[in-house]
Image (cartoon, helix red, strand yellow):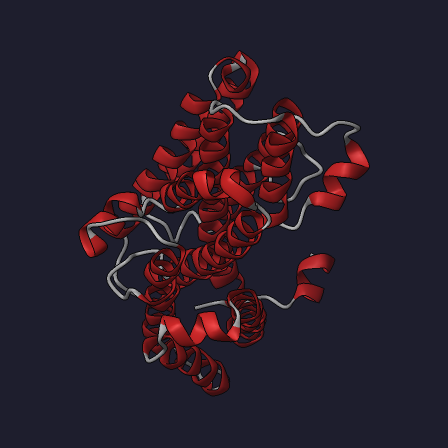
């Protein structure tokens, strides 16, 4: 497969997954904002959400006030924010258009229709009138894209590059959500902090569609250690770090070339570390330090995949 084709497939999937992840975080934050809380606590919650994507500085440079309206505008429609839902879905559509001959008709039509409906929703004011409905639409379109892709594409290299883009973005997002949510929760002290612990953890689980799965696995009270264990070490949890790395290893094996041996070794090492880890050891080491190290490894893995299979950044900029 040509590296430029692989690059477009990889980023089509990555942009779509990023849009979904952003919608998940915003939806949980919007729901949580309806609960009784101080203005300071609400503002801290929105700032923590910006911190997941490392966009605090970019937001502060453009907006004078940190409110729900401004954050939604920045994270959904702002053309200057590379992680906004509008930018991501536009990027996914452009990548899909560049490789229409590689995609099935159903996949292309799904990506194109998503972009067209996005323009309608942004003009109609749906985000302002009913943000929950708009964010559910984003998640639904991502689910539809993933399902149509798996259901209609050949099980070949093209699908492997699509899966790699999806899984790397998902692993990065899960780690960031865990890190930021636990840091924000740790800042709460006293009775108020204890009382809100359940809501923080429940919101975290819902942001990755894991609330019901948590109940199936543990069946009792929601605790920080078990939430971390579910989202890091539970192999049957689709968005856990270990499940993501297992998928990365499998897809790298399907597309391996003469350059990818070191990349496969790094992915295998990451997977093995998670596969045989104990949550007690991770918490003793420090969850933040563990997740920071994992995020650095994911970034390195993404760079290695680009170097082994995709279009170099310099060529993209000159194209």
Q: Is residue 293 above or below residue 151?
A: below
Q: Is residue 90 left or right of residue 231?
A: right
Measured along the vertical axis of the image, is residue 30 above or below residue 8? above
Q: Is residue 232 above or below residue 102?
A: below
Image coords of residue 145 (percent x, y): 35, 42
Residue depicted at 34% across the width and 67% down the height: 233
**Nearer to the camera, 218 or 314:** 218
The percent position of residue 171, horizontal first and vertical second, equals: 44, 60
Query: Is 147 or 78 nearer to us in this picture?
Result: 78
Which residue sits at x=71%, y=38%?
80
From the viewer's perspective, tell me whether residue 286 is left or right of residue 105.
Answer: right
- The tally of labels here is 0
Image location of residue 240, percent across then percent down: 36, 60
Residue 228 drawn at (x, y percent): 39, 60
Residue at the far front in the pictured view: 191
The answer to which quarter of the image holds residue 255 is: bottom left
Residue depicted at x 65% and y 44%: 82
Q: Which residue is at 59% across, 66% downward?
A: 311
**The C terminus, quarter of image:** bottom right
In which quadrant of the rendered image does the N terminus lie?
bottom left
| Foreground of the two, 115 or 196 | 196
Q: Is residue 41 above or below residue 271?
A: above
20 or 200, which lies in front? Answer: 200
């Amino acid at each position: 497969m040509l590296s430029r084709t692989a690059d477009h497939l990889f980023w089509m999937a990555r942009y779509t997954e990023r849009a979904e992840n952003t919608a998940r975080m915003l939806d949980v934050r919007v729901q949580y904002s309806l609960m009784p809380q101080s203005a300071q606590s609400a503002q801290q919650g929105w700032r923590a959400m910006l911190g997941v994507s490392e966009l605090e500085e970019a937001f502060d440079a453009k907006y004078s006030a940190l409110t729900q309206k401004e954050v939604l505008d920045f994270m959904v429609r702002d053309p200057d924010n590379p992680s906004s839902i509008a930018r991501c879905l536009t990027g996914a559509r452009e990548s899909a258009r560049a490789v229409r001959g590689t995609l099935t008709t159903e996949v292309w039509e799904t990506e194109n229709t998503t972009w067209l409906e996005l323009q309608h929703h942004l003009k109609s004011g749906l985000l302002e009138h009913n943000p929950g409905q708009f964010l559910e639409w984003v998640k639904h379109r991502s689910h539809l894209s993933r399902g149509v892709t798996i259901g209609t594409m050949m099980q070949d290299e093209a699908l492997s590059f699509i899966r790699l883009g999806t899984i790397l973005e998902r692993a990065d997002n899960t780690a960031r959500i865990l890190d930021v949510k636990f840091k924000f929760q740790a800042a709460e002290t006293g009775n108020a902090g204890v009382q809100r612990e359940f809501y923080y953890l429940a919101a975290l689980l819902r942001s990755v569609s894991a609330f019901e799965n948590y109940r199936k696995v543990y069946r009792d009270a929601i605790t920080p250690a078990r939430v971390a264990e579910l989202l890091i070490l539970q192999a049957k949890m689709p968005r856990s770090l270990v499940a993501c790395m297992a998928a990365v290893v499998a897809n790298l094996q399907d597309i391996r070339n003469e350059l990818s041996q070191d990349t496969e070794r790094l992915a295998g090492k990451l997977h093995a570390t998670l596969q045989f880890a104990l949550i007690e050891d991770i918490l003793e080491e420090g969850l933040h330090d563990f997740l920071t190290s994992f995020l650095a490894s994911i970034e390195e893995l993404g760079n290695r995949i680009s170097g082994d299979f995709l279009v170099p950044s310099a060529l993209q900029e000159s194209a």
